[in-house]
Amino acid sequence: MKRLFAILIALGAASADEFPEVYNSEKNQKSQPMSPEEAAKAFKVPEGFEVTVFAAEPEVRNPIAMAWDHNGRMFVAENFTYAEKGKRFDLGLRDRIVIFEDADRDGKAEKRTVFSDRLQMLTSVEVQPGGVWAMCPPQLLFIPDRNGDDIPDGEPEVVLDGFTVAKSNYHNFANGLRWGPDGWLYGRCGGSCPGNVGAPGTPKGERVPLRGGIWRYHPKRKFFEVIVHGTTNPWGHDWDEHGEGFFINTVNGHLWHMIPGGHFDRPFGRSVNDKVYEAIQMHADHWHFDTTGSWTKSRNGAANDFGGGHSHIGMCIYQGDHLPKEWQGKLLTWNQHGRRLNVERLEREGSGYMAVSYTHLTLPTIYSV
């Protein structure tokens, strides 16, 4: 039996460890979410697959990102400070990084450790021996833990700043920390949150302009650069077996080959380089919504015949040995409004790649009727 592991969220009370109480907007709704076990059973998956619950509320709440250490433990970034548009961020709350461990490898976490609960505007987490990286725009932080006891050695160190958070489309702010196969720490940023990035104290003229796209930082060389420019809101990236990078996006196309130095289609502004002749369009032979109409009309199942809609959350190129061999090398991404997992096949085309639609798995309806 092949398994798909998912973090499934149900309602739960706030913990009592002096962590600020969070307003529960779903408390008085007529229909309540399924239990985690019910939600797992409601997934529609291919024959031979099974969805199981790894962790659920109240042990994990508001997960926005996750990463794994060399011991196979899961580090989860929980975000509570992101708020409705009028408020943007509720800084009376805090965000936290929680560690989950499945020591007996039965597919369910038995141990939960709060690594840090003093963060705000947390969008991402990544791990290395000696500490934890946290993306908290406008800053990239490093939280030292040199003895590996899961207790921070001190206050977070500000490694970079200048990741602007827009007043309007603030959901596009910097996120997506992930180690690349080249030893660099990679991240993403949406086009509506232009920034000027550098180490704290770097003069304005020496900072690196960031106008959306994929960036990376070398922890030993202390060097920051933007790899590709453009798109609207990249929400996931990964590398194939050859070290070629790809990332998923929303609105103006959904998939790009991460060609270093590339300037990609950006519908809401010009490239940072005014000498660019023409922006590169997406690297896929299909759309997940009807482009004869507005992308905003592809939500809530309206684009099911096209692949689910414009919004994609997270991405990986599967290279494990747990799923059937036909899944090897396939690109996987969650489609938010279509409640499904889009699966795409990457094919060489010219000097780059093209994504071809392969199949999809359907997610459950979380609320009962």
Image (tube, rainbow, N blue to C red):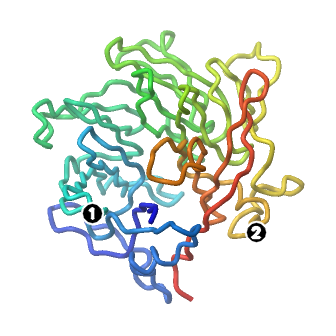
Amino acid type of the residue tagged 2 in the rendering: Ala
User: Is 236 left or right of 94, judged from the image as shown?
Assistant: right
Task: Pick the residue in front: 325 or 360.
Answer: 325
Name which residue lies at 39% across and 75% down.
36
Name which residue lies at 36% across and 76% down.
11
Task: Pick the residue in front: 84 or 14.
Answer: 14
Give residue 270's position: percent from left, percent from top.
74, 27
Q: Which residue is mark 1?
A: 106
User: Is 243 left or right of 359, judged from the image as shown?
Assistant: left
Name which residue lies at 32% across and 65% down.
55
Which mark, residue 248?
none
Task: Pick the residue in front: 263 or 103.
Answer: 103
Q: Is residue 155 above or below residue 327?
A: above
Which mark, residue 302?
2
Give residue 191's position: percent from left, percent from top.
63, 36
Give residue 128's position: percent from left, percent from top.
27, 32
Mark 1 burial class by Cα count in 10 Å: few <14, some 14-19, many 20+: few
Task: Pick the residue in front: 146 or 285.
Answer: 285
On-image quarter of the C terminus: bottom right
Amino acid type of the residue tagged 1 in the rendering: Asp
> Residue 210 is drawn in which quadrant?
top right
